[in-house]
Amino acid sequence: MFTGFDFDVIQRSLPYLWQGMVFTLGLTMLSMAGGIFLGTLLALMRLSSSRILNLPAGGYVNLLRSTPLILVIFWFYFLVPIAIKKISGDAYAQGIGPFYSALIAFTMFEAAYYCEIIRAGIQSVPRGQVQAAYALGLNYRLAMMKVVLPQAFRNMIPILLTQGIILFQDTSLVYVVGLTDFMGAAGKVAQRDGRLVEMYLFAALVYFLLCFTASHIVKRLQVRYSVGR
């Protein structure tokens, strides 16, 4: 089956592939952190009784969840420079670059999904906990920060990590703006050396091992937290 399979091309390319993996992991972590922060704000807005807050938040979530991620990346990479030129009046104004375009696109896109996860997590906290916080003299902000959100995030950790795994896989879309992640690095080596089978099989194996391991950790966390309730 592996007759003619060149294992050396993988070994020779490991430093370059590692650079791509570092980029992938860095983009995943930054986007995940930004997405959770923005998603938390959106979730609080959606749960607000004020229509001024919940309607824009709901519209944002519905728009982003109905739009392909690759299109969102294109928006920031191609449309932001045009908008900057229109606003500044400078015909030579530059955009924010491919990396920041991808980072902002992933952050804003993931925030829409994290918003719904966090909103469900907040709603899973018993109403009695909130009433007890109010009885202790806490206002809405302190009740959320000290009572509701800590419990909600504890319940949501497995789901947040699962969404992080999906984000890790989605980072391969950065090729559309010329960035080189792990998948992009494997593809460039495959094209350069004419070893498509070796490189794409290796990339698939790496993605499988990382995602399978992360999924196993998520399952263990789900069991641990379900027992702890």
Image: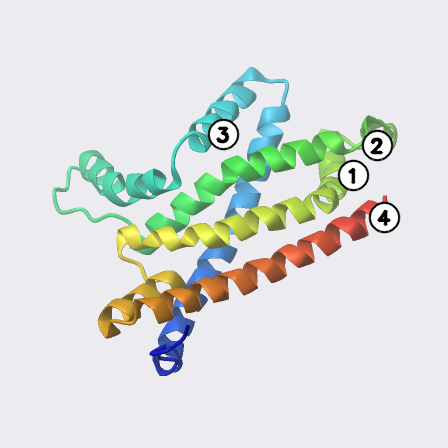
Q: Quadrant of the N terminus?
A: bottom left
Judging by the rendered image, the residue that carries numbered circle 2 is 129
How far apart marks 3 and 2 lie (CA) works out to 27 Å
**Residue furthest left in the image:** 91
Judging by the rendered image, the residue that carries numbered circle 1 is 147
Q: In the image, what residue type sits under mark 1?
A: Val
Q: Quadrant of residue 42?
A: top right
Q: Residue 161: image x %, image y %? A: 61, 51
Q: Residue 210: image x %, image y %? A: 55, 63
Instruction: Kindly state the secondary structure of the residue where label 4 is placed.
Output: helix
Judging by the rendered image, the residue that carries numbered circle 4 is 227
Which of marks 4 and 2 precedes in the sequence? 2
Instruction: Kindly state the secondary structure of the residue where label 3 is placed.
Output: helix
Q: In the image, what residue type sits under mark 4?
A: Val
Do the residues bearing badges 3 and 2 touch, measured as CB atoms within 8 Å? no
How far apart marks 1 and 4 lie (CA) works out to 21 Å
Q: Nearer the viewer, mark 2 or mark 4?
A: 4
How far apart marks 3 and 1 lie (CA) works out to 26 Å
Do the residues bearing badges 1 and 2 touch, measured as CB atoms within 8 Å? yes
Q: Quadrant of residue 172?
A: bottom left
Q: In the image, what residue type sits under mark 2?
A: Gln
Q: Quadrant of the C terminus?
A: top right
Instruction: Kindly state the secondary structure of the residue where label 2 is placed.
Output: helix
Q: Nearer the viewer, mark 1 or mark 4?
A: 4
Which of marks 4 and 3 precedes in the sequence? 3
Q: Residue 177: image x %, image y %? A: 27, 52
The answer to whether 58 is drawn above or below residue 3 in the figure is above
Which numbered marker is on residue 61? 3
